Amino acid sequence: MNLQKLSVLKDKLITAKDFQDPWNYFFDHFGENPDFLQLGHRSHDPALKTIIEGIGEQLFKKKVKVSNFLLTEIAEHNFFHGACFIQGRIATVLFFKDIDKGLLAISMSMGSSAVSLVRFSSLKIESSRSPNGKYNGKN
């Protein structure tokens, strides 16, 4: 298994105008390969779950429930992939933590194989307040 192709996937994720391109590349080279599916370790990333909830709320125009979130991390490539349900619809996520960019595919219509693809970025915002709510003097 050539994991160097993850760098090609990362580049496609960054530059794609058509999000189907990185999506197809992932499944052509990784997503249906049993050897790849055995790599990495189960992971939990609350920030990524929060991002997915936010995307779901934008798509469905209401508060959503993300359930059965199963995430795998390949740490040496800063890469996460996994699946969950959003409002009962299957969703799949790809995410590169080092560039804070990902791709979410969600089946918007029950019983349909059509998916909506959403590329997203995350940004960590540093707070200038200490945990007790007082300003700590950092800019």
Image (cartoon, rainbow, N blue to C red):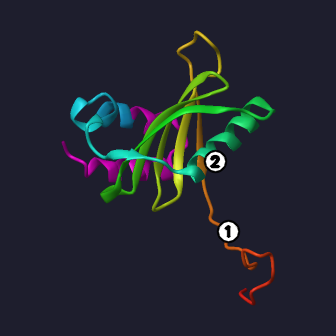
Q: Of label 2 and label 1, which has the lower sequence position?
A: 2
Q: Magenta stretch: dominant SS? A: helix
x 80%, y 84%: residue? 135
Is 74 magenta? The answer is no
Q: Secondary structure at mark 2?
A: helix
The magenta segment: 1-24
**Residue 14, percent from left and from top:** 49, 53
Q: Secondary structure at mark 1?
A: loop
**Residue 32, percent from left and from top:** 31, 27
Rounded to the nearest angstrom, the CA distance separating label 2 from label 1 is: 14 Å
x 74%, y 37%: residue? 57
Is 13 magenta? The answer is yes
Q: Nearer the viewer, residue 25 or 58?
A: 58
Q: Which residue is mark 2?
A: 51
Mark drawn on residue 9: none
Residue 96 appears left or right of 49: left
Q: Which residue is mark 1?
A: 125
Residue 43 appears left or right of 57: left
x 64%, y 47%: residue? 50
**Residue 105, percent from left and from top:** 55, 32
**Residue 33, percent from left and from top:** 26, 30
- How many residues crowd around disc 1 within 10 Å: few (fewer than 14), some, or many (20 or more)? few
Residue 51, placed above or below residue 108? below
